[in-house]
C-alpha cells in the first residue's frame, strides 16, 4: 500500500511538472512550478483531484486486506494463547525442572508471536524478504549491544540442560554459597545462610567451579576432637565410636573412621568420619560435636587449649 501511494504521489507531481514544462518549454524549476500553479489552476486542481481520488481508491482496495489481516491477527493470538496454555500444562505434568519449563514456554511464545506478525505483514503486502531482513538486522544490532546479557542467556540455557544443580541445592560458586532459590534466564539466585539474596550471572556460573553439597545422596561428616597427652587415646576412641554407633541418622552400613590424625602442639587430634544422608548432615555434625564433648567431660578426658610453657632461669 505504501509503495502504491508513493507511486500515486510521483504521478501527481509529474502531471504538474508536465503542465509547467508545456507552458514554458524548458525543464521546470521550483519557481516555474509555483508560477504554473498560479497560471494554470484548473490543470493543477485536476491533477490533485486525480491524485487524491487514486489514494481513496487504493485505500478502498486495501480495506479487504486490512480486515482479513485483523481477523488473522485475532485468530492467531487466540491460537497462540491456547497453544501456550496447553504446552504449559503438559510440561508441568512432566518430570522437567520448573525453570526449564518456564524457559521453554517463553521461548516458544516469542517465536509464535514473531511468526504471527510476519504473516500479518505479508497479508498487508509487505514482502516477507523485507520482514526477514529487518528482523535479522535488528537481531544483529541487539546482539552487539547486549553481548554480556546474551552470554548470560546462553549460560542459563546450558545450566538448564546440563543441570549441575537444581532449586533447593546448597552450592558454593564464585566465592559465595547458599541454597538455590531460582534459576532465571539471566541470573541464578541463592539464599545465603543468613538469608541474604545472592545473584550470580549465569555466564559466570556456567564457567566457574561449582560445589554442590546436595549433588549426592550421602555425605561424609568430618569431625576433629582433641585430647591431652595425659589421657588414654584408646578410651577416647572407644567413646567416640560408641556415640557414632548409637546415632540413628548415621549410615552404619558404611564403616566410620575414628583414628589419631596428628600430634598437635598442645593436644592429640582425633578425626572421626561417619557417613549420613545429605539432608541429615548438619544434624549429625552438631549432635556428635555436643555428645562427644559431654562424654569427655563425664569420663574426665581433658579437652586442652593452646598453651605455652615458659621456664624461668
Image (cartoon, rainbow, N blue to C red):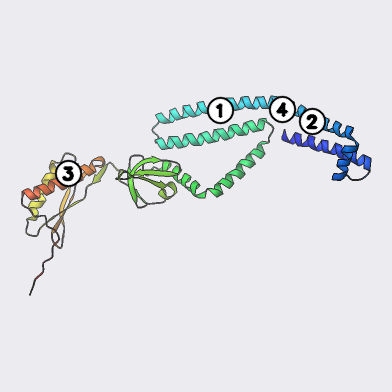
N-terminal label among 2 and 4: 2
The alpha-carbon separation of the residues under discs 2 and 3 comes to 91 Å
Residue drawn at the location 12% of the way across and 48% of the way down:
292
Indicate the position of residue 7 as horizontal and vertical percent values. 78, 36
Q: Is residue 254 visible?
A: no
In the image, 6 versus 298, the foreground residue is: 6
N-terminal label among 3 and 4: 4
Q: The C terminus lies in which quarter of the figure? A: bottom left
The residue indicated by pointer 4 is: 62
The residue indicated by pointer 2 is: 52
Q: Is residue 243 visible?
A: yes
The residue indicated by pointer 3 is: 287
Camera-near label (3 vs 4) is 4
Total count of labels? 4
Indicate the position of residue 49 as horizontal and vertical percent values. 82, 30
Indicate the position of residue 283 as horizontal and vertical percent values. 21, 42
Camera-near label (2 vs 1) is 2
In the image, 215 versus 200, the foreground residue is: 200
The residue indicated by pointer 1 is: 77
The alpha-carbon separation of the residues under discs 4 and 1 comes to 22 Å
Query: Is label 3 in a helix, a strand or a loop?
Result: helix
The alpha-carbon separation of the residues under discs 1 and 3 comes to 59 Å
The alpha-carbon separation of the residues under discs 2 and 1 comes to 35 Å
Amino acid at each position: 500500500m505504501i509503495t502504491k501511494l508513493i507511486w500515486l504521489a510521483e504521478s501527481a507531481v509529474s502531471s504538474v511538472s508536465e503542465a509547467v514544462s508545456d507552458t514554458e518549454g524548458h525543464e521546470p524549476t521550483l519557481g516555474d512550478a509555483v508560477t504554473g500553479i498560479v497560471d494554470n489552476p484548473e490543470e493543477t486542481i485536476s491533477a490533485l483531484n486525480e491524485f487524491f481520488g487514486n489514494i481513496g481508491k487504493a485505500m478502498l482496495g486495501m480495506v479487504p486486506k486490512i480486515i482479513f489481516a485483523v481477523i488473522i491477527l485475532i485468530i492467531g493470538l487466540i491460537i497462540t494463547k491456547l497453544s501456550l496454555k496447553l504446552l504449559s500444562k503438559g510440561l508441568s505434568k512432566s518430570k522437567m525442572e520448573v525453570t526449564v519449563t518456564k524457559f521453554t514456554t517463553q521461548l516458544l511464545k516469542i517465536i509464535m508471536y514473531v511468526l504471527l506478525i510476519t504473516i500479518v505483514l505479508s497479508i498487508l503486502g509487505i514482502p516477507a524478504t523485507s520482514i526477514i531482513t529487518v528482523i535479522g538486522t535488528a537481531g544483529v544490532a541487539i546482539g552487539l549491544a547486549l553481548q554480556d546479557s546474551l552470554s548470560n542467556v546462553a549460560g542459563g540455557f546450558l545450566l538448564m540442560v546440563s543441570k549441575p544443580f537444581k532449586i533447593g541445592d546448597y552450592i558454593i560458586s564464585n566465592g559465595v554459597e547458599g541454597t538455590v532459590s531460582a534459576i532465571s534466564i539471566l541470573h541464578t539466585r541463592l539464599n545465603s545462610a543468613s538469608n541474604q539474596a545472592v545473584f550470580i550471572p549465569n555466564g559466570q556460573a556456567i564457567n566457574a567451579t561449582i560445589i554442590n553439597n546436595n549433588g549426592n545422596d550421602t555425605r561424609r561428616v568430618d569431625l576433629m576432637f582433641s585430647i591431652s597427652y595425659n589421657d588414654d587415646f584408646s578410651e577416647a576412641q572407644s567413646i567416640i565410636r560408641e556415640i557414632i554407633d548409637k546415632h540413628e541418622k548415621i549410615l552404619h552400613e558404611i564403616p566410620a573412621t575414628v583414628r589419631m590424625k596428628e600430634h598437635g602442639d598442645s593436644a592429640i587430634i582425633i578425626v572421626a568420619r561417619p557417613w549420613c544422608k545429605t539432608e541429615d548432615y548438619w544434624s549429625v555434625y552438631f549432635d556428635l560435636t555436643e555428645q562427644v564433648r559431654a562424654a569427655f567431660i563425664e569420663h574426665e578426658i581433658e579437652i586442652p587449649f593452646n598453651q605455652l610453657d615458659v621456664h624461668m632461669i
